Image (cartoon, helix red, strand yellow):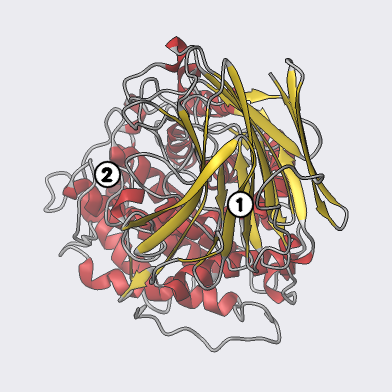
């Protein structure tokens, strides 16, 4: 697919892996900004991309287009110390004046309670803060007052009780620094709320969801870490506690990045998990912030390798069609978007360009690229706060997330493929189907409806393991608190293999079918099946029965994967045998055909499973010193 961009020639001396340097990032920013110029409204207060509007409406979407591309322009111009050869800021200055002028031709929507303009105002004030000498200070007093008056709508408004509190922090801080009336309580409240949501290990929850469920995702990096650090930098001259808070945020970011760097495959792709994935490589923003405040476990060459790899993955993969980003992963794929997603929403990729604030002589730009930790050695790492098992393999560069803690559960509510699957990876995506099957364990009731994984409750697990339990439900309206059923699941992983153990407590379910699904592969052509190993030509995956299963099959579908029109996943089936039944499977995902395959039939000396009534233990010897063990406490 044509990108509409002409990038500099790759520099494989400085960047032997991606070929990208700072010049590529500057060019990428410039060309995105030039691509939207024809879509400016006459007075430049909106950028109207067309397409399906968000739930906030087309007028709000036009402001979103302005705000998010302005943030990109701000990083680009501030990073070049005001150099603006394409005149980006001239256009945004004109639009800023038109949008905030009372009774003007293109007024922006006011900032009111829980309204989308509050979100976009945060990008605008961040852009104004960064470009203050070249934009804000060139406005006359009346123009500055008009901008401040519009921003002060936030001072009298309530916001969503999640990362939105940080938008009000940023707006209030800008007003304070510019000498206008501001809501000091918003700063205190917002910074206080993120303390409520800090879960340890560098991880923040994005809100407390009324205490009914947890969800962790990329917002932890591109919002919960990004904004507080920027606030502390901006507030240092005004707020006596800013330096102390910055040190707290710095220590948390160091710890967070120990996990976050495991979320990027060698192909550049972030692990496909969580909402707002159309923001794509915005996930690299905390990597650059780590360099900016000396809070990273990476070398500068590793940081640039991961960040450039992610941006290049989407550019080369077709995420931009004639210069404009789609609502999808590569091409448009509406099922993965949220109702708040509009045509300009993908421009929150602008956050990745925070790296341009690091000057050209910073080591992140001058060092020779180095392989990421994922590319140099296999790894299994437990992220305790979200209860993820992060498993990566150097040979094929695949990053995997085995999920035992993030559910985004609202009672009641439908299954969310972006949060409740058993596993995710950098090279695969969940199927957006009516009923979950891939990377999902289900009890199938008499009418053929599979159960859903509702609220995920953590369980203790041994080293290199993760475990959880849930009360399955069958309908969106069912409340798991009323369910007498329980499914406990434990996972261990090594070398591209995952040992899964499920223990089902069934009040009266003897005879019902259970189903365990593996990874879904997708592509432009039909996924091939060779002796139970599925392949799309680049990846191979399989799921094998170890205990409790008697049948297997392949689920094929079209139009349900953002990675290609054709998709397939393997699955196993068994039956409940009494009040408690145990099942074990082995799942594989890799770039090569699996080197070890369990025996086709009958018991195996390589595998053992024991249920003593209080816990289930399973052990599988993969050979060559690789042993997978799961201890599942009931």
The percent position of residue 565, horizontal first and vertical second, equals 34, 64
Tell me the crowding category of disc 1: few under 14, some 14 to 19, or many 20 or more residues within 10 angstroms, Cα based.
Answer: many
* Nearer-the-camera pick, 125 or 363: 363
Q: Residue at x 40, y 32 (%)?
A: 450
The percent position of residue 206, horizontal first and vertical second, equals 51, 33
Left or right of residue 367, residue 61 in this image: left
Query: From where the camera sits, is residue 290 visible?
Result: no
Q: CA distance from mark 1 to mark 2?
A: 33 Å
Q: Secondary structure at mark 1?
A: helix
* Nearer-the-camera pick, 626 or 78: 626
Q: Is residue 339 above or below residue 91?
A: above
Quarter of the rendering occupied by the C terminus: top right
Task: Find disc 1 in the rendering and name its residue.
Answer: 286
The percent position of residue 362, horizontal first and vertical second, equals 70, 69
Residue placed farthest to the front in the image? 602
The percent position of residue 561, horizontal first and vertical second, equals 38, 56
Left or right of residue 148, residue 11 in this image: right
**Residue 238 quadrant:** top right
Query: From where the camera sits, is residue 169 visible?
Result: yes
* Nearer-the-camera pick, 437 or 610: 610
Residue placed farthest to the bottom in the image? 9
Q: Is residue 379 above or below residue 590?
A: above
Please tell me whether mark 1 or mark 2 is closer to you in this view.
Answer: 1
Contact, mark 1 vs mark 2 (Cβ under 8 Å): no
- Of mark 1 and mark 2, the one earlier in the sequence is 2
Task: Find disc 2 in the rendering and name its residue.
Answer: 146
* Nearer-the-camera pick, 162 or 214: 214
Quarter of the rendering occupied by the N terminus: bottom left
Q: Secondary structure at mark 2?
A: helix
């Amino acid at each position: 697919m044509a990108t509409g961009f002409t990038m500099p020639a790759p520099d494989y001396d400085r960047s032997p892996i991606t070929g990208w340097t700072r010049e590529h990032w500057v060019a990428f920013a410039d060309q995105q900004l030039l691509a939207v110029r024809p879509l400016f409204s006459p007075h430049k207060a909106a950028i109207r991309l067309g397409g399906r509007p968000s739930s906030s409406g087309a007028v709000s979407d036009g402001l979103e287009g302005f705000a998010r591309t302005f943030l990109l322009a701000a990083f680009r111009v501030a990073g070049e110390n005001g150099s603006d050869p394409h005149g980006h800021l001239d256009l945004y200055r004109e639009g800023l004046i038109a949008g905030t002028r009372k009774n003007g031709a293109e007024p922006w929507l006011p900032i009111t309670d829980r309204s989308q303009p509050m979100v976009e105002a945060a990008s605008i004030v961040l852009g104004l803060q960064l470009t203050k000498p070249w934009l804000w200070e060139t406005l006359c007093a009346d123009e500055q007052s008009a901008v401040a008056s519009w921003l002060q709508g936030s001072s009298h408004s309530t916001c969503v009780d999640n990362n939105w509190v940080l938008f009000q922090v940023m707006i209030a801080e800008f007003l304070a620094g510019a000498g206008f009336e501001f809501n000091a309580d918003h700063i205190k409240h917002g910074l206080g709320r993120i303390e409520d949501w800090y879960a340890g290990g560098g991880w923040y929850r994005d809100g407390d969801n009324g205490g009914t469920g947890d969800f962790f995702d990329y917002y932890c990096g591109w919002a919960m870490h990004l904004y507080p650090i920027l606030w502390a930098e901006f507030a240092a001259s005004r707020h006596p506690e800013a330096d102390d808070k910055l040190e707290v945020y710095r220590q948390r970011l160091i710890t967070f990045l120990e996990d976050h760097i495991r979320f990027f495959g060698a192909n550049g792709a972030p692990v496909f998990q969580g909402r707002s994935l159309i923001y794509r490589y915005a996930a690299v923003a905390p990597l650059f912030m780590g360099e900016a405040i000396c809070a990273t476990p990476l070398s500068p060459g590793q940081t640039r390798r991961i960040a450039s790899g992610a941006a290049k993955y989407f550019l080369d993969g077709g995420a931009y069609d004639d210069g404009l980003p789609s609502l999808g992963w590569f091409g448009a794929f509406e099922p993965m978007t949220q109702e708040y997603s509009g045509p300009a929403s993908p421009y929150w990729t602008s956050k990745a360009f925070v790296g341009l604030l690091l000057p050209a002589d910073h080591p992140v730009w001058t060092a020779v690229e180095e392989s990421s930790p994922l590319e140099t050695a296999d790894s299994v790492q437990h992220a305790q706060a979200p209860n993820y098992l992060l498993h990566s393999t150097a040979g094929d560069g695949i990053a995997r997330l085995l999920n035992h803690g993030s559910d985004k559960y609202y009672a009641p509510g439908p299954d969310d493929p972006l949060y409740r699957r058993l596993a995710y990876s950098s090279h695969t995506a969940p199927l957006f189907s009516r009923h979950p099957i891939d990377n999902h364990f289900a009890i199938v009731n008499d009418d053929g409806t599979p159960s859903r994984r509702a609220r995920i409750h953590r369980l203790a697990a041994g080293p290199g393991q993760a475990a959880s339990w849930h009360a399955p439900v069958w309908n969106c309206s069912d409340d798991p608190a009323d369910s007498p059923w329980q499914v406990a699941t434990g996972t261990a992983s090594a070398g591209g293999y995952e040992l899964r153990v499920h223990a089902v407590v069934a009040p009266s379910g003897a005879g019902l079918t259970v189903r365990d699904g593996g990874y879904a592969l997708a592509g432009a052509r039909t996924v091939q099946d060779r002796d139970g190993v599925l392949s799309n030509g680049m990846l191979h995956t399989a799921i094998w029965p170890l205990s409790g299963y008697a049948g297997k099959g392949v689920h094929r579908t079209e139009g349900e994967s953002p990675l290609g029109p054709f998709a397939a996943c393997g699955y196993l089936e068994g039956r409940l045998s009494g009040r408690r039944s145990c099942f074990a499977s082995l799942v594989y995902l890799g770039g090569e055909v699996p080197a070890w395959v369990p025996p086709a039939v009958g018991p195996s000396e390589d595998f053992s499973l024991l249920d003593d009534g209080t816990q289930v233990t399973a052990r599988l010897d993969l050979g060559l010193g690789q042993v997978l063990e799961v201890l599942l406490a009931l």
